[in-house]
């Protein structure tokens, strides 16, 4: 799974990315500070199952604090997009192609209205962030449209009257976006397009197809950034009314980055996603002033910085992934004595057999059955798993 962090230049994308990864990247106050995509690992937060077993787990990857488990997920930040990116403006096609493999997008928007359409700093409140939400959707939709229509006239004529051919051809054309044949077929039916007469599809119908393909294959959550600035509050309420179908989360990436760095330095106790923090180290007056500002303008107002919530929303609400733990009915520890050391993120509809294959191909090859460790019941290979299940795989060897 890969989460793409997208948006126009200079809205805080790189700050958002650094706040979830603590990666050492360039953060600068000008367009195209990021050129090559940055990749790293962030962590979704879930209630750990160890508490249900009266245990303390020992993760091999991520961490578990106060029975809150942090599970790694790959994220990518690409350079800021500009209007006309799908036409190649501002290296747009290069940046869009970087996002082909992303499963979902976090669209970082300057909700304070302090960055214009070119990514240049302006007076807070002087720019309408609604333009950015609309522009990015248009760029992504036209990007998909461009992929569909590449050689379309010749292709559509060649596929006339051949049952199923256009669906297969479109799926192949869109394969770089991780789009399946089944998805294409269902959307063609949904839009009532005649699969036997693709040459008769109008430009508007193909554009509509591109829109639904993008929405289904690349779902998006809006990270309403810079919520510590006074002009942001009214804007975020207005955006929620203007775009009722979108998930819009109030965010302060700069606040989150400050809190994580302070926690790493041992100055505060802070768990990403929490609504507060506690001082624990030698904090000088300037640091205390900055931390008090974050509490007053972000945590007390919004309940969190919103960064962790945004990442969790992308993984669990948009993509509906599940966290599944390997374990044993009689023993939760591995051979080294580590309790519940692993946690895997699986897509919806995953079965016990899928889970075995995710862990290791040998487990899938020799799969016999599985055990639901919580209920101690045997389950079959086609049993659908649920979020936070603990599963033991039984094999023939």
Image: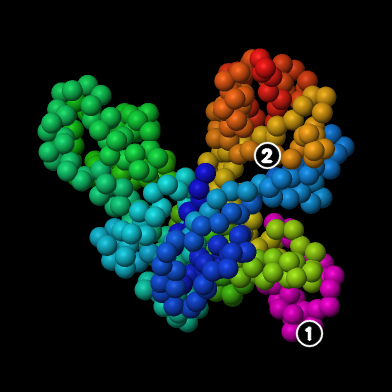
Q: Nearer the viewer, mark 1 or mark 2?
A: 2
Q: Which residues are magenta?
A: 273-298
Compared across the picture, whether 181 is left or right of 222 comes to left
In x, y percent, where is residue 13? 50, 65
Q: Is residue 338 above or below residue 283?
A: above
Nearer the observer, 63 or 54: 63
**Does 49 lie within the magenta span?**
no
Residue depicted at x 55% and y 35%: 347
Give the tally of numbered discs.
2
Q: Secondary structure at mark 1?
A: helix
Q: Secondary structure at mark 2?
A: loop
Compared across the picture, whether 39 is left or right of 339 comes to left
Mark pair 1, 2: CA separation: 41 Å
Upstream in sequence: badge 1 or badge 2: 1
The answer to whether residue 114 is visible is yes
In x, y percent, where is residue 210? 31, 44
Residue depicted at x 79% and y 72%: 267
Q: Which disc, if any, is residue 203?
A: none
* Label 2 Cα crowd, 10 Å radius (few <14 / some 14-19 / many 20+): many
Nearer the observer, 364 or 299: 364
Quadrant of residue 7 within the rendered picture: bottom left
Q: Quadrant of the C terminus?
A: top right
In x, y percent, where is residue 321? 58, 38
In x, y percent, where is residue 362? 59, 25
**Does 283 lie within the magenta span?**
yes
Considering every residue shown, the one lying at the far right of the view is 54
Q: Which residue position is annotated with label 2? A: 343
Residue depicted at x 74% and y 40%: 341
Residue depicted at x 31% and y 34%: 171
Q: Which residue position is annotated with label 1? A: 285
* Label 1 Cα crowd, 10 Å radius (few <14 / some 14-19 / many 20+): few
């Amino acid at each position: 799974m890969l989460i793409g962090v997208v948006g126009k230049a200079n809205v805080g994308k790189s700050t958002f990315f650094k706040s979830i990864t603590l990666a050492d990247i360039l953060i600068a106050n000008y367009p195209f500070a990021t050129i090559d995509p940055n990749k790293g690992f962030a962590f979704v937060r879930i209630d750990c199952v160890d508490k249900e077993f009266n245990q303390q787990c020992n993760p091999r990857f991520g961490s578990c604090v106060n029975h809150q488990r942090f599970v790694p997920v790959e994220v990518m930040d690409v350079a800021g997009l500009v209007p006309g990116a799908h036409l190649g403006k501002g290296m747009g096609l290069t940046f869009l192609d970087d996002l082909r493999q992303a499963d979902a997008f976090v669209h970082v928007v300057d909700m304070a209205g302090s960055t214009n359409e070119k990514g240049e700093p302006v007076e807070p409140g002087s720019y309408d962030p609604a333009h950015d939400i609309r522009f990015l959707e248009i760029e992504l939709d036209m990007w998909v449209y461009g992929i569909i229509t590449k050689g379309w006239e010749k292709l559509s004529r060649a596929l006339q009257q051949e049952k199923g051919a256009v669906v297969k051809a479109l799926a192949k054309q869109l394969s770089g976006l991780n789009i399946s044949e089944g998805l294409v077929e269902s959307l063609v039916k949904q839009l009532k397009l005649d699969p036997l007469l693709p040459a008769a599809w109008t430009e508007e119908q193909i554009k509509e197809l591109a829109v639904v393909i993008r929405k289904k294959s690349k779902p998006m959550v809006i990270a309403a950034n810079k919520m510590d600035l006074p002009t942001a509050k009214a804007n975020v309420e207005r955006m929620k009314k203007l775009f009722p179908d979108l998930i819009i989360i109030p965010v302060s990436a700069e606040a989150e980055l400050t809190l994580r760095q302070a926690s790493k330095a041992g100055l505060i106790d802070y768990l990403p996603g929490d609504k507060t923090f506690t001082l624990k180290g030698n904090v000088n007056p300037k640091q205390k002033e900055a931390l008090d500002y974050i509490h007053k303008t972000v945590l007390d107002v919004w309940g969190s910085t919103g960064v962790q919530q945004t990442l969790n929303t992308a993984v669990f609400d948009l993509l509906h992934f599940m966290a599944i733990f390997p374990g044993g009915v009689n023993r939760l520890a591995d051979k080294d004595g580590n309790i519940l050391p692993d946690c895997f993120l699986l897509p919806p509809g995953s079965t016990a057999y899928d889970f075995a294959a995710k862990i290791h191909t040998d487990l899938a090859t020799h799969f016999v059955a599985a055990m639901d460790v919580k209920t101690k019941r045997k389950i079959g290979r086609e049993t659908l798993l649920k979020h936070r299940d603990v599963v033991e795989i039984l094999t023939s060897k």
